[in-house]
Amino acid sequence: MAHFIKLHTLEGAEMLFNLDVVVSIDPLPDGTMVQTRWGGTKVREDIDKILSLSNPSVTASGQQLITENELPY
């Protein structure tokens, strides 16, 4: 099933992005470049905002990292 998020172009237009086809997301001085299989689009949202939209129940923090000492084997 496709995983869509709503982002805004630098001009303010709303767009739905299917995260299943995103290749990379890179910061720019005036926004973020979302690169898909078919091309790239500059959006207003920063990388942290895009990450939170992609999985609202998960926050980006070092606390989610699993160290070797925490592995069950």
Image (cartoon, helix red, strand yellow):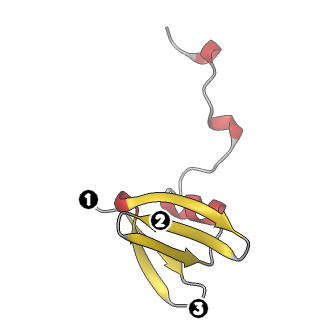
The N terminus is located in which quarter? bottom left
Report whether 59 appears left or right of 6. right
Q: What element carries label 2?
A: strand
Q: What element carries label 3?
A: loop
N-term-proximal mark, 3 vs 1 = 1
Q: Distance between the residues labelled 3 and 2?
A: 18 Å
State whether residue 23 is above or below residue 64. below
Count neighbours of disc 2 (C-alpha within 10 A) and say few if under 14, some if 14 to 19, many if 20 or more: some
Kindly identify the amino acid type of the residue bearing the numbered disc 3.
Answer: Glu
What is the quadrant of residue 68 in the picture? top right
Say which residue appears at 57% left-offset and 77% top-offset.
43
Residue on which the image places disc 1: 1
Q: Mark 3–mark 1 contact, CB under 8 Å?
A: no
**Mark 3 or 2, closer to the camera:** 2
Q: Which of 20 and 72 is in front in this view?
A: 20
Say which residue appears at 41% left-offset and 77% top-offset.
16
Q: Where is residue 65 in the image (x, y as percent from the top left)?
A: 63, 32
Residue on which the image places disc 2: 35
Residue on which the image places disc 3: 11
Q: Where is residue 5 in the image (x, y as percent from the top left)?
A: 45, 70
N-term-proximal mark, 2 vs 1 = 1
Kindly identify the amino acid type of the residue bearing the numbered disc 1.
Answer: Met
Report whether 36 appears left or right of 33. left
N-term-proximal mark, 3 vs 2 = 3
Kindly identify the amino acid type of the residue bearing the numbered disc 2.
Answer: Gln
Q: Is mark 1 on a helix, strand or loop?
A: loop
